[in-house]
Image: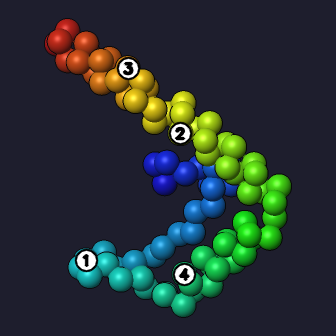
Amino acid sequence: REIVVHEQTGLLVPLKRQEAPPYEALDPDGFATELAEALNRVAGDADLRRRLGQAGRHRASQEFSWSQIAQRVGALYRRLAVK
């Protein structure tokens, strides 16, 4: 969820799971069905694949590149140094 923006850079399939170990799916068959539907949707739609791929690449380079990470770490250090 932190990386993929649903319907913009990919498709997220929610997984409802146990809140304690072993954290298994509450409805494994339902999850499998929803995952298969999402995969089939992407596999069957070239425009969707292209749009998600382009948007995902753009988001990755803008949000998660080494230069962006370095800028954020530097900003964090500057904020901490002021306190």
Q: Earlier in the sequence, mark 3 or mark 1?
A: 1
Quarter of the image where the C terminus is located? top left
Q: Specify the label residue 59 is tagged with.
A: none
Report which residue position mark 3 lands on: 71
Furthest toward the top, the residue is 82
Question: Between residues 73 and 17, which one lies in front from this camera angle?
Answer: 73
Residue at the spot 63% in from the left edge and 61% down from the top edge = 11
- Residue carrying label 4: 31
Image location (x, y in percent) of residue 78: 25, 12
How packed mark 1 is, by other alpha carbons closer than 10 Å (few <14, some 14-19, many 20 or more), is few
**Residue 3, above or below 36:** above
Front-lying residue, 28 or 39: 39
Looking at the rendering, which quadrant does residue 16 occupy? bottom left
- Left or right, 73 with respect to 3, comes to left
Q: Whole-Å distance between the Cαs marked 3 and 1?
A: 37 Å
Q: Quadrant of residue 30?
A: bottom right
Residue beneath disc 1? 20
As helix, strand or loop, the secondary structure at mark 2 comes to helix
**Amino acid type at mark 3:** Gln
48 versus 8 height, above or below: below
- Which of disc 2 and disc 1 is earlier in sequence? 1
Q: Position of residue 5 (x, y in %)?
A: 59, 49
Distance in Å between CA atoms under marks 3 and 2: 15 Å
Q: Tell me if label 4 and label 3 are in contact, CB under 8 Å.
A: no
- Residue 18 at what x, y percent from top left? 34, 79
Q: Determine the secondary structure under disc 3.
A: helix
The nearer-to-camera label among 1 and 2 is 2
x and y percentages locating residue 67 in the rendered image: 42, 24
Residue behind mark 2 = 60
Q: Is residue 7 left or right of residue 44?
A: left
Mark 1 secondary-structure assignment: loop
